[in-house]
Amino acid sequence: MKRHTSFAAAAVAALALAGASPATAQSTFQNFICADGSRFTAAFLTQDPKQAHLQIDGKAVTLRKRFTLSGARYTGRGVTLTMTKKGTFLRHGKRGVTGCSAA
């Protein structure tokens, strides 16, 4: 619980630095669990649509949105998050691609 609280605080701080007030900021937080046992939280901020903010392995990682023909793909610091109609997939470090579902 403490980890999620610190992640939410970091997201609000990022919005404050960007000039948006937390009262007007809308964001979507989603928790995921993957087939390999990985768990992460993703934040998608309306004021920052070209990035996804992940809390994974106790660290905050900002992923930039990349071009894709279908769905959404975000990459950064050795992490790739792909969201399509077929599902959500995570590649983290050298672990390979694993399927994830909302928890």
Image (tube, helix red, strand yellow):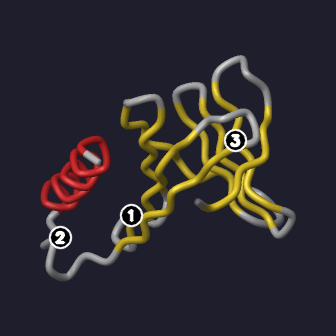
Q: CA distance from mark 3 to mark 1?
A: 21 Å
* Amino acid type at mark 1: Asp
Q: Which residue is mark 3?
A: 90
Mark 2 neighbour density, 10 Å: few (under 14) some (14–19) many (20 or more): some
* Amino acid type at mark 3: Leu
Q: Which residue lies most toward the bottom here?
A: 24
Residue 81 pos. (x, y %): 65, 46
Q: Which residue is mark 1?
A: 48
| Residue drawn at 21 percent across, 61 percent down | 15
Residue 79 pos. (x, y %): 60, 33
Q: Could you tell which of marks 2 and 1 lies nearer the N-terminus?
A: 2
Question: What is the tally of numbered marks visible in this picture?
Answer: 3
Q: Is residue 23 above or below residue 19?
A: below
Q: Quadrant of residue 101?
A: bottom right
| Residue drawn at 54 percent across, 34 percent down | 76
Q: Secondary structure at mark 3?
A: strand
| Residue drawn at 45 percent across, 45 percent down | 54
Residue 100 pos. (x, y %): 71, 50
Which image quarter is the C terminus in?
bottom right
Mark 2 and mark 3 in contact? Answer it, CB < 8 Å. Answer: no
Residue 96 pos. (x, y %): 78, 26
Mark 3 and mark 1 in contact? Answer it, CB < 8 Å. Answer: no
Q: Which residue is mark 2?
A: 20
Using the image as rendered, state which of residue 24 and residue 56 is in the foreground.
Answer: 56
Q: CA distance from mark 2 to mark 1?
A: 10 Å
Q: Secondary structure at mark 2?
A: loop
Mark 1 neighbour density, 10 Å: few (under 14) some (14–19) many (20 or more): some
Q: CA distance from mark 2 to mark 3?
A: 29 Å
Specify whether 91 is left or right of 30: right
